[in-house]
Amino acid sequence: MLDYKKLAPAILFIFGGSGDLNYRKLTPALYNLFLDAAMPDQFRIVGIGRSEFTDTDYKKHLKEGIDQFSRKKADAESWKNFSTHLDYIKMDINEKTHFEKLASVVSEQEKKYGVHPNIVFYMAVAPQLVPVIVKHLSGLAFCHDTKTARIVVEKPFGHDLESAREMNHMLLQYFEEDQIFRIDHYLGKETVQNILALRFANAMFEPIWNRNYIEHIQITASETVGVEARGSYYENAGALRDMIQNHILQLLCMIAMEPPVSFNSNEIRNKKVDVLKAIRRISFDQVQEYAARGQYGPGWVKGKQVPGYRQEKGVDAQSNTETFAAVKFFVDNWRWQGVPFYVRTGKRMRVKSTEITIQLRRAPSYAFPKEAIETWRPNRLAIGISPERDIMLRFQAKRPGQSVVLSPVDMVFNYKNAYNGEEPEAYETLLYDVMDGDATLFMRADQVEAAWEIVMPIINAWQNRKLLDFPNYSPDSWGPEDAEALIARDGHNWISQYS
Ligand code: BG6
């Protein structure tokens, strides 16, 4: 069982209680926290939605979600105990008076608990519904208790820099920054959090973690799935907004940030914002040099025919939306000057893999005989984020035998072997942290805006210049040729440990 400290009583109100996110992620995560004795001794989880549900039907619906998506399966006894903490409220978010129902839940529980609980409002709804909910919540007195009331906002956080600023402005009108928890689920992944341990709890990496030893860095987040049922959302988003503006830039920050002086949430986030501020801004005219895009066509995956992006439901038949994006970033500071960070992400690619590669400069080989160095490779540190969770260090070794023949070997740390697969899902960690009031793994307003600033020139250029060769990559491939060219121009090639 995982180890957690006990939390104060809490009430979680989940707007979008009958929706997909709650069904697939939130309730399964809360259930697993419950099984790990990480939920407070006293808590309620109140789903809020427009659909009609009896108490029994709502619980039955959530149980189905657990059976399908939970890390641990529900046994009858535990489920029965957990489900006594669940409620459902049908309400219309446009009706201010309906919000009084929440106030009655709070005062009722407060009496039972004998203390004022932590209160979490989770916005598991479409972003356009958030403003009206937030406005009506602000009419409830207990929302102004900045120590106990918290609001969780899901991505997408804005559609561009301007709308993200508006969203921040709107939220900050009603809540303090410390009360706002903007989710980026990548930050909840164990392997992502471990980057800080790897870098700052070991003496051997930090001294070489800079431009003197590192040649370049790659981040890949490839998926084998297409856009599935999310065509109408994706059509207005694209790979750059969906993955790079948030998840990938956050991974880049973890790799590039300076050592924090403490693990205080603002200290960590300050250090990450510094990275975002140091990322070189590119002009509209430089976009072609720094970025490449792609869109998948129809084809075959493992003997099965799959539609192209333009044939997916909710997608324009002439769509200009990218389902693949690759960008070369530079972090213009003392540590990273001149080191390229190549990032790429795409749907319908050959493997599902999020991984980071730190490629070191070549060691000098002059002392070895010519034949020995034919397979000479630079050292490499590869961090598997998901689904493979491992860290691999590649170095040269001498093959056994009389002659000196060198070849690279890999030293691997694997989470599954080391920890018996006992790892919380990202949403477990994030929900626990919200109840605990710890915002380290959440996005602050300035982080979100800085990340938008970085991608805006690319978004603008791609919107204004339609690519005539879309679709330009086949399913089950590594994306378009332009992405290969982007990295090949610098004499490198894309790396995946898992292909
Ligand atoms: C989401 C994107 O934020 O992340 C999805 O909207 C994507 O399009 C998903 O599939 C990937 O997450 P993970 O954890 O499977 O890498």
Image (tube, rainbow, N blue to C red):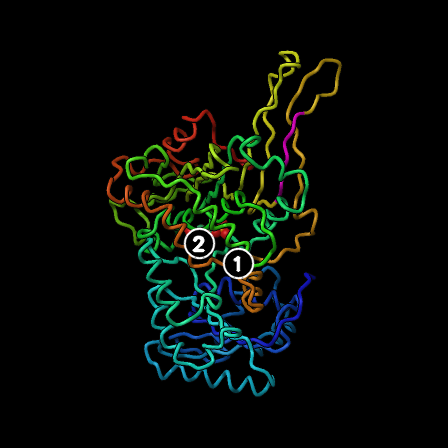
Residue 188 found in image quarter: bottom right
Asked if residue 452 can be seen in this view, the reply is yes
Q: Which residue does the numbered mark 1 point to in the structure image?
A: 266
Q: Which percent across, then down, holds residue 332?
A: 45, 38
Q: How many marks?
A: 2
Residue for point 67% across, 42% down: 413
Asked if residue 303 can be seen in this view, the reply is no
Q: What is the span of residues highlighted in magenta in the rendered image?
A: 390-396
339 left or right of 393? Answer: left
Residue 402 found in image quarter: top right
In the image shown, does 86 or 4 lie closer to the viewer? 4
195 left or right of 231? Answer: right
Residue for point 50% across, 59% down: 442
The kind of secondary structure the magenta stretch mainly shows is strand
186 left or right of 15? Answer: right
| In this view, 61 is above or below 191 | below
Q: Residue flagged by tag 1: what amino acid is it? A: Asn
Say few, some or many: other residues with alpha carbon within 10 Å of mark 1 (under 14 / 14 to 19 / 20 or more): some
Residue for point 43% across, 35% down: 477
Magenta span includes 121: no
Q: Residue flagged by tag 2: what amino acid is it? A: Gln
For marks 1 and 2, give the CA distance: 11 Å
| Element at label 2 | helix
| In this view, 265 is above or below 196 | below
Residue 440 found in image quarter: bottom right
Q: Which residue does the numbered mark 2 point to in the structure image?
A: 447
Residue for point 56% across, 27% down: 361
Q: Which percent across, then down, holds residue 100?
A: 41, 84
| Element at label 1 | helix
In the image shown, does 55 or 419 lie closer to the viewer? 419
